[in-house]
Image: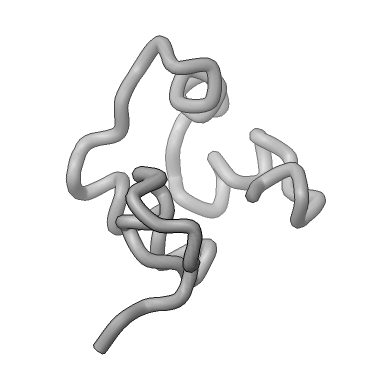
Amino acid sequence: MRRARGITQLKLAMDLNMNQNTISRYENGTRQADYHTLIMLADYFQVSIDYLLERTDRPEFYK
């Protein structure tokens, strides 16, 4: 999603007050996001946490 939206790792990290290396590790699978980070990422990209976790291919929130 980040690449598809033209957002750099550095911009994402700065927007979420995180380290760019952490974003890189999430993306290459050497680190897993905790619950709080998943919420921040879902809110940032306006998708559901299930979409981030690849439990669904539908990005929208369910209410």
Which quarter of the picture shows residue 9? top right
- Residue at x 49%, y 58% (from the top left corner): 57
**Left or right side of 25 for 55:** left
* Nearest the eye: 33 or 12: 33
- At 54% from the left and 40% from the top, the residue drawn is 13
The x, y position of residue 35, in whole percent, is 18, 45
The quarter of the picture where the C terminus appears is bottom left
- Residue at the image position 35 percent from the left and 17 percent from the top: 31
Residue 20: horizontal and vertical position, in percent?
56, 27
In x, y percent, where is residue 12? 59, 46
The residue lying at 41 percent from left, 49 percent from top is 52
Task: Name the side, left or right, on which 43 lies relative to 36.
Answer: right
> Furthest-bottom residue in view?
63
Colour setting? one colour
Horizontal relation, residue 2 to residue 36: left or right: right
Name the residue furthest left.
35
Q: Is residue 9 above or below residue 43?
A: above
